[in-house]
Image (cartoon, rainbow, N blue to C red):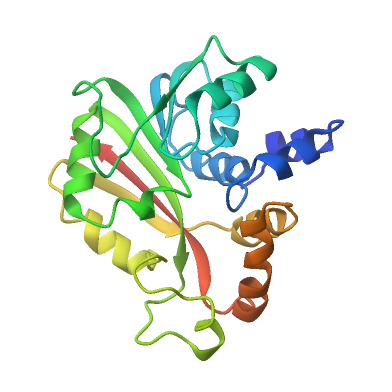
Amino acid sequence: MKTNFTDNFIKEHNNFEFLLETMMGPNSMRVMEVLLGYLPEHPSGRILDLGCGAGLSTLYLAKNFAAQIVAADLWVDPSENYRRFIERGIAEQVMPVRVDASRHLPFADSYFDYIVSVDAYHYFGEGVEMLENVAALVKPGGYIVVAVPGLQTEFKSVPEALKPFWIDGEMHMHSVTWWRELWSQCDAVEVVNVFELDCHQQAWNEWLLSPNPYAQGDVHMMAAEDGKYFNHVAMIAKVL
């Protein structure tokens, strides 16, 4: 998939510096652009960006689609995001909120046309119940569109190279097969596709350039992984 918006954004003066300072994981702007390229139609209406972080995925949505967007995150202060949205000229289109998706989704049933989530859903969505809760917020015929860091195949045991970096109970990484089987158990949606995204390496490479201490910590993990184990898993489901 082409990533014209992200590539052009990076080329503009000071934008790459902004990107590196704002990222909270593999480049969510690039992942969002590639992910949405697989939809049969352009998102419109009301969109929930669930686990938006510091708003890079939200920025992509607002700059490319005529939609009203709710930018929801647990860890980033919505006032901080609001200031960034003002600076980037999208504040009239976006409402920033704080949401703990693992506890409560404070939205009306069938309120959204789309729910999208990049680099966040794996932290709270490892059960069928969460997908059911998310689906309830989407109008019939709307879409749930997710991308998460994942595994090329499920581990029977953690590879030796990754053991220094692997913390049981905190990694939340699974394969395409694992996610497809989980989402197929939800009667509220039709699973359209579950697949690997080809922007995985580029999104990670951009993250590893960030001054964020977590990014610098990931440099050694990704060197040890060496392209053998990780990927990005995309999931697209239509709400029934």
Q: Quadrant of residue 41?
A: top left
**Is 206 drawn above or below residue 57 in the view shown?**
below
Residue occupying the point 24% across, 63% down: 181
Q: Position of residue 208 (x, y in %)?
A: 70, 59
Q: Position of residue 217 (x, y in %)?
A: 64, 66
Q: Residue furthest left?
A: 187
Depth order, front residue of 142/68 = 68
Residue occupying the point 18% across, 23% down: 109
On the rendered structure, is 109 left or right of 81? left
Q: Residue furthest bottom?
A: 160
**Is 91 drawn above or below residue 32 in the view shown?**
above
Q: Position of residue 19 (x, y in %)?
A: 71, 40
Q: Position of residue 141 (x, y in %)?
A: 25, 29
Depth order, front residue of 165/5 = 165
Depth order, front residue of 194/170 = 170
Residue occupying the point 55% across, 35% down: 57
